[in-house]
Amino acid sequence: MTGAVVAGAAMAAGCDNPNSVAAEGYTPGEVPTDKMTYRPDAHGQQVSFLGFGMMRLPVEGGGDLRSKPDAKLDQEAINQLVDYAIAHGVNYFDTSPVYLKGMSEEATGIALSRHPRDKWLIATKMSNFRDWSYEASIKMYHESFEKLRVDHIDYYLLHSFGGLDNGVSDFDKRFVDNGVLDFLLKEREAGRIRNLGWSFHGVQSEFDKVVALHDKYHWDFAQIQMNYVDWHYAHEIEEENVNAEHLYTELDKREIPAVIMEPLLGGRLGTLNEHMASLLKAQEPNRSLASWSWRHLGMYPRIMTALSGMNLMEHLQDNIRSCSPAEPLSADELALLDRVADEFAHFPAIPCTSCQYCMPCPYGLDIPGIFAHYNKCLNEGNIATEGTVEQREFRRARRAFLTSYDQSIERLRQADHCIDCGECLTHCPQHIQIPTKMRMIEDYTNKLKDSLV
């Protein structure tokens, strides 16, 4: 998954639109065309350090597919982003059959097929979450070739394993017991898959089990979540999460190339609150906040590429600058970044990256939108607390939260419509206790409304 900034025009102050991110966190400047950092894969293929995650792409008329369920992807805008990325050295593009309501692979295939095949590398996935039968899984595999318009797939992943279903490994259930992995191994042998790997979101015991299977299956790469916060603090944020230090170290021991998802935690590391941002800006006033994440990742040689979802040109441009080349951090800068990571990990935000794996909610809630609204208001000081000293400040924060909540989230899709069915819990890669957080936001909203009386 990618570390993306959600689409939208630059925002004014306040929490007006949780689906947009202010562009001021991104620093203008020259965008090099010939300085991209490249890393080798398991077979020596040179891969751009910046990978393009195709999970968050422009939608016709703006907005996103949560707020506009019948909308189509903006193919012309996607083509422009892909063209620009390739012209500036990006060659790794990552998609999945389930991204963007099943539209990502086709849109990606259209955009990439306009360029010579040796200019780009494509990664897609066995995303058999709903139906793990052999027949349905193999059908998904063949459809990826058709939608992507390719005769081989450069990087194929067993998508997002790591959970336990009544004590049974979802890795075994989805890939091993049904014969799917045996089929994919034969496809790799035939050359239709050039590199076979997996992406992980789950409990440590499952990661350790699958990475140890390297001796048997000879994994070509693995995809993990890693950034300067998750390096030491993932487990503190949510108990089931695994610190990236462990994930990376285990891959490095076996010389398995790593693909990184969520380098910017869904854009949150590019839009820090005022205090955290000031610490980094005081050290490097001309660098974007996002650039610190890329420089941190650049210190780890086993990383092959890191994925970012980029549906605004300024975000693509800034990430290209940060990776052209990826300059390492000094010891002092690394110590400063760990200080920011510690503060970020203990900041009371909801650790949602807007990946949308929890969607659609069977009761219509806009789960990522609700969390994005809450986090943005928290970041901007617009969460009114009982300890607020200034009554004027309390009224301002209350008004900012309630007004923008109704503007950005349809009334029937707000937190108070959660019935605690638990459908979302098994799909959240960050292991967020979503119904519990919904009740928290509902209770907080009701308190604000009661204070108006």
Image (cartoon, helix red, strand yellow):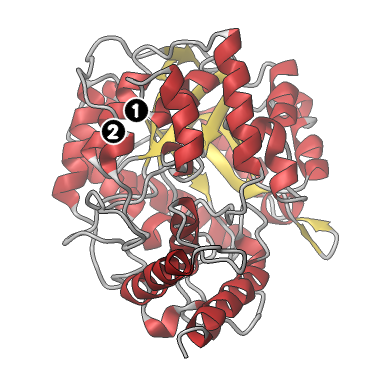
In the image, residue 39 sits, relative to residue 5, either above or below, namely above
In the image, residue 34 sits, relative to residue 303, either above or below, namely above
Q: Nearer the viewer, residue 227 or 342?
A: 342
What residue is drawn where x is 22% and y is 37%? 313
From the image, tell me which residue sits under label 2. 316
Which amino acid does the dot numbered 2 rest on? Leu
Which amino acid does the dot numbered 1 rest on? Asn
The answer to whether mark 1 and mark 2 are in CB contact below 8 A is yes
Q: In the image, residue 337 lies at what x, y percent?
A: 57, 24
Farthest residue to the bottom: give it.
453
Q: In the image, residue 27 lies at what x, y percent?
A: 28, 27
Q: Which mark is residue 319?
A: 1
What residue is drawn where x is 25% and y is 54%? 12
Horizontally, residue 249 falls left or right of residue 380, namely right
Alpha-carbon neighbours of circle 2 within 10 Å: few (<14), some, or many (≥20)?
A: many
Q: Answer with the quarter of the image where residue 47 lies.
A: top left
Farthest residue to the right: give it.
167
Q: CA distance from mark 1 to mark 2?
A: 5 Å
Asked whether residue 345 is in view, the answer is yes
Q: Answer with the quarter of the image where residue 150 lies.
A: top left
Alpha-carbon neighbours of circle 1 within 10 Å: few (<14), some, or many (≥20)?
A: many
